[in-house]
Amino acid sequence: DESKRQRLFFALWPPADVAERIAEIGRTLDGPGAVVPCDKLHVTLAFHGACDPAGRDALLARAEHVTIAPFDLVFDRLDGFDKPRLIWLGLSRPPAALFELAEFLRADTLDPRAFVPHITLQRRAGPISARPVAPIAWRAREFVLAESGARGVPGGYRILARWPLAG
Ligand code: 2AM
């Protein structure tokens, strides 16, 4: 039953005060892009696409097996993708634990792209030359499973479940 499929992804969601500072960067950039509002800012860890209920349950079960301690993230550079046209905030020194977590949660995905940790700031954006920005640091203490396009709202996200990071 196609109507039961959900677009699911694991993500890190910044605390509200951090998200507000990140959103400010997106707002102050020049250019034609659509600025992502602060409650939608996140780091996608693993994009699983359209999942049926059994697929969703498998993701919920997998998340229970994460044994990674909280880790620090320092977002300190702007960069972009060409397809789709995004401007994003990234890390010049992403911690190993971030890649471990993403790799564990990406198991069995069909996503062929390498994991590039980023927070999308603008969509349908103009070109950007990569450059450093004043660092914004945050300690990741939990990860979430989120649904994209929930209740038929494109670009709307709904957090379905949260798990604490614990080593
Ligand atoms: P983006 O911010 O780089 O566009 C929900 O759509 C989240 O999943 C977004 O963070 C988006 O990343 C990511 N996403 C959407 N489609 C994807 C795909 N085909 N492969 C990997 N990530 C995807």
Image (tube, rainbow, N blue to C red):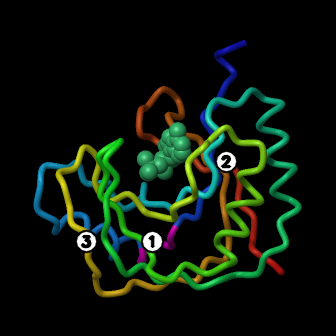
Residue 44 against residue 49 in the figure, above or below: below
Find disc 2 in the rendering and name its residue: 160
Q: Residues within 10 Å of mark 2 (few under 14, many from 20)?
A: few
| Quarter occupied by residue 83 | top left
| CB atoms of marks 2 and 3 within 8 Å | no
Answer left or right for 27 relative to 151. left
- Identify the magenta region: 14-18
Between disc 2 and disc 3, the foreground one is 3
Is residue 119 depicted above or below 154 in this figure?
below
Q: Which of the marked residues, 2 or 3, is nearer the chain's N terminus?
A: 3
Crowding near the residue tagged with mark 1, few <14, some 14–19, many ≥20 C-alpha atoms within 10 Å: few
Q: Secondary structure at mark 2?
A: strand
- The reply to whether residue 157 is visible in this rendering is no
Residue under pointer 3 = 25
User: Foreground: 135 or 150?
Assistant: 135
Give the residue at x 44% y 80%: 92
